[in-house]
Image (cartoon, rainbow, N blue to C red):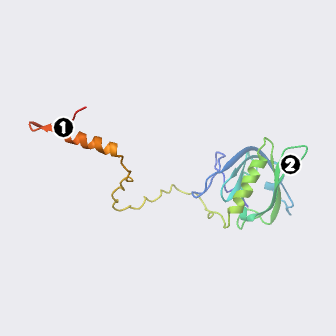
Amino acid sequence: MALNRNHSEGGGVIVNNSENILMTYDHIEITFSDIEPMPDAFKGTKKGSVFLTPYRVIFISKGKDAMQSFMMPFYLLKDCEIKQPVFGANYIKGTVKAEAGGGWEGSATFRMTFSAGGAIEFGQRMLQVASQEFYPGPPVVDGDMGYMQLPPPPYPGPMEPPVSGPDLPTTPAAEAKAAEAAASAYYSPVNPHNVYMPT
């Protein structure tokens, strides 16, 4: 988990070029426990939005909190489960380990509450995507990433001639009609560009 690495100055989320956002939910509350000693950024309840990518979960805090954003790569998450209490909003609970150079050390238990709904859908999709992910996410980028243009597609080479359609069996009536039309058609030598056919 990395602290304050995935937000823009305007409060938006920053993802790498190789990522896309699969799901997003607003009105999220997150709390942390089991951290010794607890850094100031992890104290209290944080409110904001959560984003799911193919590699990680990203939380963006609303307001001017010490924790503006944090990300939890799937390979650092464990014991994640969806909870449905009788009273209160559904939430996702789990443990996350700190990423090397991520701004904090150790591990923490998190509780992500979906006060406007969506915990079950988000949690199921998160667990599905995490089970398909067998490698660490995209490399961490230090500093600003400039605009990177993709290389042009490779030259395809000469095109093959198009394949003709399938040979359809003809009926004797259609062949007879075509032969009759060909036999009775004529053209004028004065105007060879026009063909005259009976109707």
Residue shown at 21% from the left, 35% from the top: 197
Q: Position of residue 140 (x, y in %)?
A: 63, 63
Q: Residue furthest left?
A: 190
Q: Decide if residue 27 is on the left or right side of residue 192.
A: right
Q: Could you tell whether 9 is left or right of 115 in the image?
A: left
Residue at x 16% of width, y 38% of height: 186
The image shows residue 113, relative to residue 5, as above or below, that is above
**Element type where label 2 sits in the image:** loop
Res 192 seen here: no
Vertical placement of residue 82 versus 105, above or below = above
Relative horizontal placement of residue 159, taking residue 85 as reference (left or right): left
Q: Is residue 154 left or right of residue 5?
A: left
Identify the element where label 1 is drawn: strand
- Residue 98 higher or lower than 115, as above or below: below
Image quadrant occupied by the N terminus: bottom right
Q: Nearer the viewer, residue 119 or 190?
A: 190
In-front residue for pair 186/64: 186
**Who comes first in sequence, dot 1 or dot 2?**
2
**Is 194 or 117 nearer to us in this picture?**
194
Q: Which residue shows up at 67% across the image and 57% down it?
A: 5
> Mark 1 = which residue?
195
Q: Which mark is residue 84?
A: 2
Q: Amino acid at mark 2?
A: Gln
Residue reaching furthest top? 199
Residue 76 appears in the figure: yes
Amino acid type for the residue under numbered disc 1: Val
Q: Position of residue 69 (x, y in %)?
A: 71, 53
What is the tally of numbered marks visible in this picture? 2
Q: Which quadrant of the rendered structure holds the C terminus?
A: top left
- Closer to the observer: label 1 or label 2? 1
